[in-house]
Image (cartoon, rainbow, N blue to C red):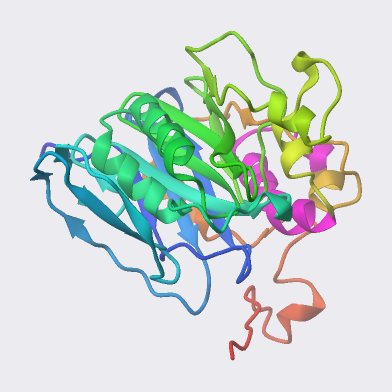
């Protein structure tokens, strides 16, 4: 039976904001790293109190001069209107008819860079890109153009962007009140490799003249200089270290999930255990790794169920697991 989508996107629940929880995880797999040559991304916003919804948005033609109303994804708050395009593509959840899929995790970043006057929030940004783009590169361009024209309303986000051929990771953050737009970097995951992100910006230094594999906002470095965040050489600029410096929580409770995935698919990740434990924040992990074997959709489903079993961070072995060795940590929501 012919597959409707070569991209597999595991959608657990709708995304949630950084103020509520840091529990989103995305795993990214390129064609050369999968058993059937398909790109795959996973997406979970594990919030305990949110319930998943898959909306179908049909393809549509729109009259010239049409406007589209933007409502914040998390709250439903009306943010404003933007220009509509003449044709929008069909979506099911966060996948469109051209086998383009997008996921996200919220990392927050520098709080002063949130611009509440912007019209585009992170959820609307994903939906609009899927309605207007056919490929990952096209989606990145649409996302960059939208926030530049209408402003970005959310805090820092990492996005997984995949089509049937390529998989990209994109880190984006606003410029704060009075500076409409956002700064961002997107990197293509090399074929045969896998990546992941979990509520911590992961892109550090990046090639400045390699548009085939790296795209970025033209002012991503100059804006950091203007704000006094960075004063080194361009080649030494790190997006993550500048706009979302990792702290103990970012390593222990966010990057640790990336470490656990990497440690299950390749060897040598023990050298980064002190980072995953939040003990050595200088020992940053690579942005991607080459898996020891090719991965199937079932593998990713199992990795998304991980509770650090078999590692020093095993959630079934600490005091919080209780007498029944429960891997979950229940919490009350008022």
Residue 265 in which image quadrant:
top right
Q: Residue furthest bottom?
A: 334
Residue at image coords 64%, 28%: 220
The percent coordinates of residue 207 (x first, y second) are 64, 14
User: Is 301 within the magenta?
Assistant: no
Residue at image coords 91%, 50%: 279
Could you tell me if residue 115 is visible in this image? yes
56 over 242 or under it: above or below: below
Give the magenta part as a residue range: 248-272
| 26 sits to left or right of 100 | right
235 over 204 or under it: above or below: above
Residue 324 in which image quadrant:
bottom right
Residue sitting nearer the eye, 107 or 35 = 107
The percent coordinates of residue 178 (x first, y second) are 62, 46
The percent coordinates of residue 260 (x first, y second) are 67, 49
330 over 140 or under it: above or below: below
The overriding secondary structure of the stretch rendered in magenta is helix
User: Is 258 within the magenta?
Assistant: yes
| 36 sits to left or right of 278 | left
Which part of the image, by quadrant, shows the N terminus?
top left
Give the tally of numbered discs.
0
Could you tell me if residue 256 is visible in this image? no
Residue at image coords 81%, 79%: 319
Residue at image coords 52%, 77%: 48
Which part of the image, by quadrant, shows the C terminus?
bottom right
Q: Residue furthest top?
A: 209
Residue 89 in which image quadrant:
top left
């Amino acid at each position: 039976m012919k597959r409707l989508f070569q991209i597999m996107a595991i959608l657990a629940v709708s995304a949630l904001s950084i103020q509520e929880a840091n529990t989103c995880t995305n795993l990214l797999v390129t064609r050369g790293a999968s058993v059937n040559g398909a790109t795959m991304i996973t997406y979970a916003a594990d919030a305990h109190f949110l319930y998943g919804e898959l909306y179908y948005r049909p393809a549509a033609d729109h009259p010239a001069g049409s406007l589209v109303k933007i409502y914040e994804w998390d709250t439903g708050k009306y943010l404003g209107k933007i220009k509509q395009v003449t044709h929008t593509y069909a979506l099911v959840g966060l996948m469109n008819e051209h086998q383009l899929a997008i996921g996200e995790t919220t990392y927050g970043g520098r709080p002063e860079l949130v611009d509440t006057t912007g019209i585009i929030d992170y959820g609307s940004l994903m939906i609009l890109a899927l309605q207007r783009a056919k490929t990952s590169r096209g989606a990145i361009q649409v996302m960059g153009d939208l926030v530049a024209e209408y402003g970005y309303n959310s805090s820092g986000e990492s996005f997984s962007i995949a089509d049937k051929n390529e998989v990209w990771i994109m880190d984006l953050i606003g410029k704060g009140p009075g500076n409409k737009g956002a700064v961002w970097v997107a990197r293509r995951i090399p074929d045969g490799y896998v990546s992941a992100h979990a509520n911590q910006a992961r892109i550090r230094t990046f090639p400045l003249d390699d548009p085939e594999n790296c795209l970025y906002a033209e002012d991503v470095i100059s804006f950091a200089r203007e704000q006094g965040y960075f004063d080194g050489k361009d080649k030494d600029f790190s997006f993550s270290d500048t706009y979302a410096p990792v702290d103990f929580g970012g390593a222990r409770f966010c990057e640790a999930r990336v470490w656990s995935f990497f440690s299950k698919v390749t060897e040598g990740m023990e050298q980064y255990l002190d980072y995953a434990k939040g003990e050595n924040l200088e020992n940053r992990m690579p942005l991607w790794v080459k898996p020891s074997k090719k991965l199937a959709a079932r593998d990713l489903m199992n990795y998304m169920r991980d509770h650090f079993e078999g590692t020093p961070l095993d959630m079934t072995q600490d005091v919080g697991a209780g007498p029944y060795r429960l891997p979950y940590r229940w919490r009350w929501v008022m």
